[in-house]
């Protein structure tokens, strides 16, 4: 990661200061909207899923241990400076949700669990091409994101309806956020004037894996009352049942990280007329 950072800074300096013509520093604004697939992995969530499968001995269908990729829309707004070589600064919001994992009992009841990721991402990039003369472009990125992850743990009734209410133990929405960052590449092509297509791949890691942050249902833990349900997802179900309010060393945390794939339509304002 440090080597990638050094290479990126070198390219940044060459792009920023390699040309001195005033025309090369004409600012642009661009908007990109599309669809993202977050192929994340986690070491923490399977610990709970394995424990749940072992504890519930009457399950006819056990939880799988790997969540499907989370998918959903994104919107990006950015600015750039340069001509053939551009410095890029953009801000992106993502909202991606996975399909559920399911566990079932013989009477048709059970549990579903899925994840939703909401990211606010700031990106610094170096883009080559993307002019009238060179409609194809490639980009190298470094990014920093605030990543909010929510685990939905629902009770499933025999008719297939879902409930996230507190009438069942563990049911609810467990959320937290952490800082994430990484690097990636993107590419695109201008098709008609300022309109184009773009694809991207980013490797995303979290900064707090060694001390992962717990998931919680309640936004203000000071308001948790003794008659409320425990406010965490356990590592061990047997310990949770015998001593439910003791979350010390028995709660999983958020360590989602992995690959982010994007594909979208872009609209660039400014440079397409100048170049």
Image (tube, rainbow, N blue to C red):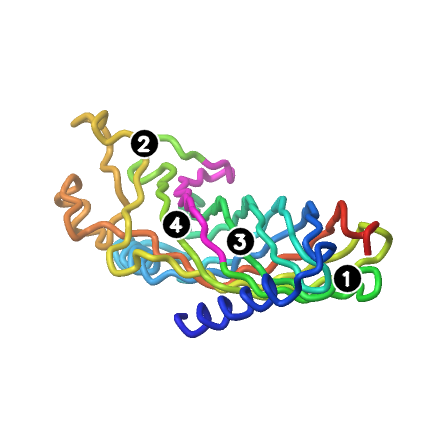
Task: Name the residue: 43% across, 57% down.
Answer: 181
Q: Residue 154 at what x, y percent from top left?
A: 41, 40
For numbered disc 3, what is the local secondary structure? strand
Name the side, left or right, on which 197 lies relative to 42. Answer: right
Circle nearer the N terminus (1, 2): 1
Quarter occupied by residue 191: bottom right
List the residue tagged with mark 4: 105
Do the CB atoms of the residues marked 4 and 3 lie less than 8 Å apart?
no
Distance from label 1 to label 2 (Cα)? 44 Å
Q: Position of residue 19 (x, y in %)?
A: 66, 65
**SS at mark 2?**
loop
Mark 3–mark 1 distance (CA, rounded to whole Å): 20 Å
Disc 1 or disc 4, which is closer to the eye?
A: 1
Identify the mark nearer the N-term, 1 or 4: 4
| Cβ–Cβ under 8 Å for marks 2 and 4 | no
Work out whether mark 3 precedes mark 1 in sequence or the reverse, and give the earlier one: 3
What residue is drawn where x is 34% and y is 57%?
Answer: 207
Instruction: Determine the image quadrant of residue 77.
Output: top right
* On screen, residue 210 above or below 171: below
């Amino acid at each position: 990661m440090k080597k990638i950072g050094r290479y990126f800074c070198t390219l940044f300096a060459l792009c920023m200061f390699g040309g001195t013509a005033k025309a090369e520093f004409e600012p642009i604004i661009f908007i990109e909207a599309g669809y993202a697939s977050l192929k994340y992995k986690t070491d923490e969530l399977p610990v709970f899923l394995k424990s749940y499968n072992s504890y519930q001995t009457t399950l006819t269908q056990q939880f799988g241990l790997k969540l499907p990729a989370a998918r959903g829309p994104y919107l990006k707004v950015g600015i750039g400076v340069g001509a053939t070589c551009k410095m890029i600064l953009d801000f992106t919001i993502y909202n991606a949700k996975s399909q559920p994992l399911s566990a079932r009992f013989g009477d048709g009841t059970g549990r579903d669990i899925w994840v939703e990721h909401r990211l606010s991402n700031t990106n610094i990039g170096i883009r080559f091409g993307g002019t009238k003369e060179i409609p194809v472009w490639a980009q190298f990125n470094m990014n920093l994101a605030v990543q909010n992850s929510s685990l939905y743990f629902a009770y499933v009734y025999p008719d297939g309806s879902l409930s996230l209410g507190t009438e069942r133990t563990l049911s609810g929405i467990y959320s937290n956020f952490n800082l994430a960052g990484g690097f990636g590449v993107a590419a695109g092509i201008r098709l008609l004037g300022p309109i184009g297509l773009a694809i991207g791949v980013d490797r995303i890691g979290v900064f707090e894996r060694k001390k992962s942050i717990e998931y919680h249902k309640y936004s203000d833990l000071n308001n948790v009352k003794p008659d409320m349900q425990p406010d965490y997802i356990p590592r061990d179900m047997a310990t949770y049942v015998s001593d439910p309010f003791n979350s010390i060393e028995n709660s999983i945390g958020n360590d989602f990280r992995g690959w982010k794939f994007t594909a979208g339509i872009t609209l660039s304002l400014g440079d397409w007329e100048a170049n």
